[in-house]
Image: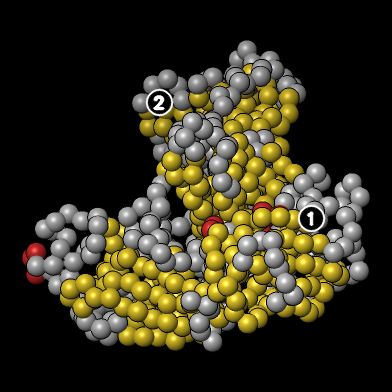
Amino acid sequence: MKWTADTVTLADGTTVTGAGGTRAITTDGRTVLRGSNFLLPRDGKLYHWNDTGGATTWTLPAGWTAPRLYRLTDTGRQFVADLPVTAGRITLDAAARTAYVVTDGPAPTQADPQWGEGTPVKDPSFHSGDLTAWSVTGTGATVTRNTRGQNELTMAAGTSPAVSQRLTGLTPGTYAASVWVTTPTGRAATLAVTPTGGAAASVYADSSPLTDNLGGSDKNGTTSQRMKVLFDVPAGRDSATLTLSAATGPGTVVLDDVRVVRSARTPLGGHWFAEDFEHVDAGWGPFAFGGAGGSATDPRTHIAQRNAPYTQAGWNGKLVDDVIGGQNSLKSHEERPGLVYRTLPQTLRLTAGRSYRVDFRYENGFAGDYRFVVGSGTTESATALGQARTATTFTKTFTAGADAWFGVRKVTAEDSHDQADLILDDLTVDDLGPGAGGELLVPQDRMRVEAVDSEETAAENGAAANVLDGDASTFWHTRWYAGAAPMPHEITLDLGAAYNVSALHALPRQAQSNGRIADFQVFTSIDGVNWGAAAASGTFPDGAARQDVTFAPRTARHVRLRATREVNGNPWTSMAELDVGYRP
């Protein structure tokens, strides 16, 4: 190695100089770096970078005759052009701050990256940049790169596309399917899974009210949040179809990071909803981080695991147990002030005007640190959680407002005292019916469609069974493709047992008015043979809001809805969901 005032010469003859204030590297008689631009040789290839962009000219290595330029991307090389050679030199016209490689002749074939390898889903995060691994129906679905350089599935405004994929290699049992979603208010984005030979399951989001404030999340600062659905693969089967779709509406739906993992269900124990935190595959069950402490740091809340005696009260001065029941509980450790966590519409959908009872067991090191909050949009009501150094049951009954949710808020400073810890476990929610009290709902999974006069299954999925699937984006529609069946139209439900029936709750088709019922009648029967006079009749308005038909309670096992006129005078009928109310 030789040194001069502004030049270093290496043993192989390569020189590095800063003469004139510009750094340059020369090897084998060729300049390979000038300032911040370079064409560096490595492993038989030449790598190019130009900080400001534009055209630069370089000398090729001896013997190169067919140089080809490729852009380097996170999904592999992309061919740009064959480069003309003049007197052993080439000119590269490069975009600023973009990586390129030059090869002599065609570059080697790239290996398949096998996005999603080891999981049931191919290309689950859309890294390929396209939808080759997915089947697409409709228009408007595309893979879009966001401002952070992340590929996401987007569904354009005014479109209703669906992308699906057949999952194989599954084993019998319960799985959790999830996806991160952002959707405009009022536009339903749905994740659905249909196991081969099994029951379909779905979940939807129709708003994105909560900003992702997790400091370590690549969705930080967006309104993207996770939604999940459980599905069961039957014995002797090993496949399912997963579908992502969006209803027609304004604004863009964004979906990303599809995951399918083994899971298990929390036993309901007769409740409408239950979470014991024993089988949480990701996140905090029905809760999402509320943003306590801001978006620059991660929360101090996690699923705590039992490791007695070290995790339990009494060890080394611990005031409360980290785990109350089973092997896991939800623990908030000396959290920062603010909303620690809350439910979302896609994790626990609460209906405005209905009453709910929330129960959970908790331990709390000190009174005054945490509050249970019930929200309606941005409005909150709070109940202080008292000191509880042994497992204590908390109960709260409330009537849900619009955009309803519940969660926990920390109200004291993060350094107010040590062991400001809240442990929550065995969460249950019961739907008590309309806010006036008294009514309960027959669970949809106990009911079945007993009879229907017409359903469209040739041109669309207008099956009558859709009224009991819990998915507002699907609907029953009478036949229209091969000639419209005439009015009136009827759908009959078998409740599975006799109830003191007092109401029928009807959710109209959401995306458009076709088939929405105007004039209607409701009938009930004990035996499904003798029906008698209508329990109720009337006219529904043309809209997407749920319609509640109440009548004097009577014993019945069968309920029939008859449509006699459609809102636009058409001969068909549609309905998204039906629920039957009863008095205990």
Q: Is residue 211 visible?
A: no
Residue name at image x 73 percent, y 60 percent:
491
Q: What residue type is disc 1 on?
A: Asp
Q: Is residue 535 visible?
A: yes
Which of 56 and 557 lies nearest the eye of the viewer?
557
Residue name at image x 44 percent, y 86 percent:
381
Left or right, 218 with respect to 247, comes to: left
Left or right, 320 with respect to 152, comes to: left
Q: Which mark is residue 10?
A: 2
Which of 23 and 434 lies nearest the eye of the viewer?
434
Query: Does 460 sit above or below residue 297?
Result: above
Q: What residue type is disc 2 on?
A: Leu
Q: Which mark is residue 453?
A: 1
Percent x, y of residue 458: 80, 44
For marks 1 and 2 on the same chain, the one whose residue lies earlier in the sequence = 2
- Count of picture labels: 2
Which of 455 and 203 lies nearest the eye of the viewer?
455
Which of 501 and 479 lies nearest the eye of the viewer?
501
Quarter holding residue 172: top left
